[in-house]
Each structure stands twice: as structure tokens, then as C-alpha cells.
Image (tube, rainbow, N blue to C red):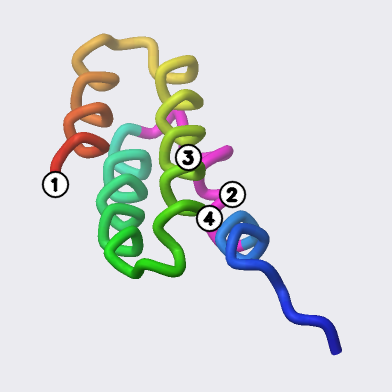
């Protein structure tokens, strides 16, 4: 049986959360924090970075209040 690529696995698990949770500040912040934790695993870091950036872009479009966007951006930048 063929293996699954890290990026595909992450996208399968977190992609729907990123997509459907983009307009919910609590979900978007928690997703960014969770992805930051996963990024500490060297094998996942590259794929996580892409997913986190895409999730942030989605939230920037979906969140109508600048303060909420700023909260998600702060979570994405926190290290």
C-alpha cells in the first residue's frame, strides 16, 4: 500500500478546519496555535508552514473585523 505524503495528511486533517473555520476568530486562532506546535516537528515543518499561511490568508478574507484579523495574525506570528 502506498504511503501518504505529510502535506496530504495535514491537508486532509486540517484543510477543512482552515476552510470552514476561517471566518471564526476562535477557530482560526486555535488552528494557528496548533499548527505552530506541529511545525516544531522537522519532518512536518514545511507542509505546516504552507497550510498555516493559506489558513491565515483565508481568515484575512473571511473575517470582517480588523481586530479579529489582527488576533489571528498575532497567533500566526507568535513563536
Say whether residue 8 is magenta. no
Q: Secondary structure at mark 4?
A: helix
Nearest to N terminus: mark 3 or mark 2: 2
Between the residue at mark 2 and the residue at mark 1, the CA separation in whole angstroms equals 22 Å
Q: Which mark is residue 14?
A: 4
Task: Relative to 40, say whether 69 is above or below.
Answer: above
For image coordinates 40% across by 57% down, the residue present is: 45
The disc, 2 or 1, on the residue closer to the chain's N-terminal end is 2
Tell me the quarter of the picture where residue 65 sits: top left
Image quadrant in which you'd find residue 60: top left
- Tag 3 residue: 21
Q: Is residue 22 magenta?
A: yes
Specify few, some or many for label 3: CA neighbours under 10 Å numbering under 14, 14-19, or 20 or more. many
Q: What's the magenta bit mostly, secondary-structure-wise? A: helix
Q: Earlier in the sequence, mark 3 or mark 4?
A: 4
Mark 3–mark 4 CB contact (< 8 Å): no
Q: Earlier in the sequence, mark 4 or mark 1?
A: 4
- Up the image or down, 75 lies above or below 34; here it is above
Do the residues bearing badges 2 and 4 touch, measured as CB atoms within 8 Å? yes
SS for dot 1: loop
Q: Residue furthest left?
A: 79
Badge 1, how many Cα within 10 Å: few under 14, some, many 20+?
A: few
Q: In x, y percent, where is residue 6?
A: 59, 66
For residue 13, the mark is none
The N terminus lies in which quarter of the figure?
bottom right
Q: CA distance from mark 3 to mark 4?
A: 10 Å
Q: Report which quarter residue 71 is drawn in.
A: top left
Disc 1 target residue: 79
Check disc 3 and report its element: helix, strand or loop. loop
- Where are the magenta residues, as a range? 13-24
**Left or right for 25, reference 13:** left
Amino acid at each position: 500500500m502506498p504511503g501518504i505524503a505529510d502535506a496530504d495528511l495535514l491537508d486532509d486533517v486540517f484543510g477543512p478546519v482552515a476552510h470552514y473555520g476561517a471566518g471564526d476568530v476562535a477557530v482560526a486562532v486555535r488552528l494557528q496555535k496548533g499548527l505552530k506546535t506541529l511545525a516544531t516537528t522537522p519532518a512536518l515543518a514545511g507542509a505546516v508552514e504552507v497550510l498555516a499561511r493559506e489558513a491565515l490568508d483565508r481568515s484575512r478574507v473571511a473575517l470582517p473585523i480588523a481586530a479579529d484579523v489582527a488576533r489571528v495574525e498575532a497567533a500566526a506570528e507568535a513563536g
